[in-house]
Image (cartoon, rainbow, N blue to C red):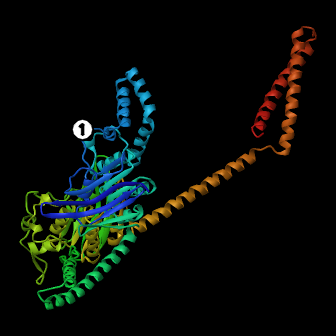
């Protein structure tokens, strides 16, 4: 198996904060690796170091010679003035340069330039590349190749970056949160594409279904060290638990032995022999090993919600559209107490608009939302809030409240409340600009929950959150004494948290499905199978009808006899007609009555021929 990448004793720190130290691992041809770690542990930093976009303190990053590498950034950035096709052809390799020359020659219409460009396209295989480029863009629902990047949504830009990475056909593809900002249809397409692809992968993603179905190896960055597991995500979970149990057992054994050795040390005289010195050295080694402490800290979502009454909200004939794009069309619904609703649908069908309409952030065109008096919304938006990057974490929270009171017994200072979300007293003094994307999301979640909402509206809450935090959030939402609406592309998250779904199908159509996402996909798959079966049945019926029609068109025995006799009769009539015409035109018949009789016979023959030829044609079609 070919080695693609070797990481040797890699160390990276920011100031006095060590992200990881002496990390060593390898990537081999065909590996599909998922990198897992808590927020702030350095996942994105490690990927950027491997991609050559960030320095490191010590160690080595060694790639195989002539290896073609592509890197999908978590938040891709483009020149907004470029067209979609320009972005895909922005590489400096021979193929993209040749395709650009060909496209330019088409634009100028210069025959000489075009001839040269066509010749080069043949030489470098540019036609295949261009076909592949347009095929991948189309599969990712990008069909206007000349659309400016500035007109693309965040999801479209992520798909464009993904297309650019895939089109280049790299040997080794590095992906940082590839599922963020993609709708479920695109995630499942990418999942299927990467499973079938021979590309070697190293990815960071919080999507557990994606990890389980694509990855064949998991690397965990834990306690500043790397642990590797040869298997998918489910295998990793079981083996990780075994590792932690073994570490805990070993630590307990070390501490017991240390107590014994500590007693021996206290009893030893000042003068020690060689054997005693060896035991003393072993004692100090035990002391170091006993200092190991697992960082099992996690977000503590023990915050309570406010009381919520029986009346939640009622939508009455609500309609909303933007130009020709219909979001809601005469929509009515009564939301129940403690209901947990998931919203799914393609990007751009109006999921985020719907929850903004509910809260009055967007105004309806017609109809109304009647909100209960006790309802207190907590809105976690996809865009987040704009924190002041130069503000300290603690100051951002204190601006909202110095003390958070949930009831008479439960009160937290701003600092205590932040500790529930893994911001230690020292971390609370950090500037927000220094936080990772996941840490900012965790801070945002804290600011939402400190208002004690009883109706949570979460728009893409899984973006940038680590898997540990997601699992805790899932448990919290299951026990949450209030109402929940979740818009998310994370299928695992939806399966664990919602009771039913609104499926936004476009053009204002909303399907209410009584189940979670996996149940919906199973139902949809069965519907497709039924549709295929119905189409096949109709096709068989049509074929049978056609066959019957064909059979009905075939000549019967009597018709075949008639057909054969008609041929003889037509030939005989034609011969008779020619004879009569010859006699009349010879001038040898002087009797007027004979001329009249023969002329009359010719008219009869012509009538008979028309009749018999028409019947002959009718029967010949069945032949």
Circle 1: is it few (<14), some (14-19), or many (20+) Cα within 10 Å?
few
Judge by depth and name the residue closer to the eye, 216 or 276: 276
Residue 9, position as x, y percentages in the image? 26, 61
Q: Secondary structure at mark 1?
A: loop
Check the picture and name the quadrant holding the C terminus.
top right
Residue 350 picture quarter: bottom left
Quadrant of the image occupied by residue 132 = top left
| Residue 505 appears in the rendering | no
The image shows residue 432 at horizontal and vertical percentages of 12, 60
Asked whether residue 524 appears in the rendered view, the answer is: yes
Q: In the drawing, does residue 579 fall left or right of residue 489? A: right
Closer-to-camera residue (216/444) = 216
Task: Return the residue at label 1.
Answer: 81
Q: Position of residue 416 (x, y in %)?
A: 11, 75
- State the quadrant of the N terminus: bottom left
Residue in view at x 18 percent, y 62 percent: 440
Q: Quadrant of residue 21?
A: bottom left
The relative height of residue 526 versus residue 282 in the rendered view (above or below) is above
Q: Position of residue 510 (x, y in %)?
A: 36, 60
Tell which of 450 and 531 is nearer to you. Answer: 450
Residue nearer the viewer, 207 or 146? 207
Count every numbered label the image shows and give the total. Answer: 1
Q: Residue at x 37, y 63 (%)?
A: 211
């Amino acid at each position: 198996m070919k080695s693609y990448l070797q990481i040797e004793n890699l160390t990276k720190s920011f100031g006095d904060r060590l992200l990881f130290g002496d990390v060593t691992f390898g990537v081999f041809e065909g590996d599909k690796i998922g990198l897992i770690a808590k927020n702030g542990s350095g996942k994105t930093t490690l990927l950027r170091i491997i991609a050559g976009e960030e320095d490191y303190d010590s160690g080595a990053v060694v790639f195989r010679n002539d290896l073609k590498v592509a890197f999908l950034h978590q938040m891709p950035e483009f020149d907004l003035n470029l067209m979609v096709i320009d972005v895909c052809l922005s590489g400096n390799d021979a193929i993209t340069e040749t395709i650009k020359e060909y496209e330019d020659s088409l634009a100028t219409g210069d025959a000489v330039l075009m001839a040269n460009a066509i010749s080069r396209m043949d030489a470098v295989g540019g036609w295949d590349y261009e076909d592949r480029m347009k095929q991948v863009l189309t599969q990712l629902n990008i069909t206007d190749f000349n659309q400016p990047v500035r007109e693309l949504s965040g999801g479209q830009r992520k798909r464009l970056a993904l297309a650019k990475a895939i089109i280049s056909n790299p040997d080794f593809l590095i992906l940082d949160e590839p599922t963020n900002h993609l709708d479920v249809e695109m995630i499942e397409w990418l999942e299927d594409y990467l499973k079938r692809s021979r590309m070697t992968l190293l990815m960071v993603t919080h999507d557990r279904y994606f990890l389980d179905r694509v990855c064949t190896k998991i690397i965990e960055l834990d306690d500043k060290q790397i642990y590797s597991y040869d298997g998918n995500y489910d295998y990793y979970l079981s083996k990780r638990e075994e590792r932690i149990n073994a570490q805990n057992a070993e630590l307990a054994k070390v501490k017991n032995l240390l107590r014994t050795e500590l007693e021996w040390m206290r009893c030893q005289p000042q003068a020690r022999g060689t054997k005693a010195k060896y035991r003393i050295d072993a004692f100090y080694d035990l002391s170091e090993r006993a200092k190991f402490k697992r960082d099992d800290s996690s977000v503590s979502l023990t915050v309570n919600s406010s009381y919520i009454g029986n009346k939640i909200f009622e939508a009455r004939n609500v309609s909303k559209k933007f130009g020709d794009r219909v979001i809601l069309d005469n929509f009515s619904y009564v939301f129940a107490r403690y209901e947990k609703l998931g919203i799914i649908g393609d990007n751009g069908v109006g999921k985020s608009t719907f929850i903004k309409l509910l809260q009055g952030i967007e105004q309806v065109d017609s109809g109304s939302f009647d909100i209960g008096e006790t309802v207190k919304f907590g809105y976690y938006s996809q865009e987040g809030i704009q924190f002041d990057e130069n503000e300290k974490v603690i100051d951002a929270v204190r601006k909202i409240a110095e003390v958070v009171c949930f009831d008479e017994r439960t009160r937290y200072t701003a600092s205590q409340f932040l500790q529930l979300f893994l911001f230690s007293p020292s971390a609370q003094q950090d500037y927000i600009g220094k936080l990772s994307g996941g840490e900012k999301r965790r801070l945002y979640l804290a600011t939402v929950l400190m208002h004690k909402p009883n109706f949570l509206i979460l728009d893409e809450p899984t973006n940038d959150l680590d898997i540990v935090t997601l699992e805790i959030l899932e448990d919290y939402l299951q026990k949450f004494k209030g109402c929940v609406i979740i818009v998310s592309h994370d299928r695992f998250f939806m399966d664990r948290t919602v009771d039913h779904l609104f499926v936004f199908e476009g053009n204002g159509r909303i399907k209410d499905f009584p189940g979670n996402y996996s149940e919906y996909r199973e139902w949809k798959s069965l519907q497709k199978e039924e549709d295929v079966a119905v189409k096949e049945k109709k096709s068989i019926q049509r074929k049978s009808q056609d066959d019957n029609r064909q059979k009905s068109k075939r000549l019967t025995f009597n018709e075949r006899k008639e057909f054969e006799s008609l041929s003889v009769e037509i030939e005989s009539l034609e011969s008779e007609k020619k004879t009569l015409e010859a006699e009349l035109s010879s001038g040898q018949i002087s009797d007027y009555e004979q001329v009249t009789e023969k002329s009359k016979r010719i008219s009869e023959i012509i009538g008979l021929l028309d009749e018999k030829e028409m019947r002959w044609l009718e029967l010949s079609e069945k032949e």
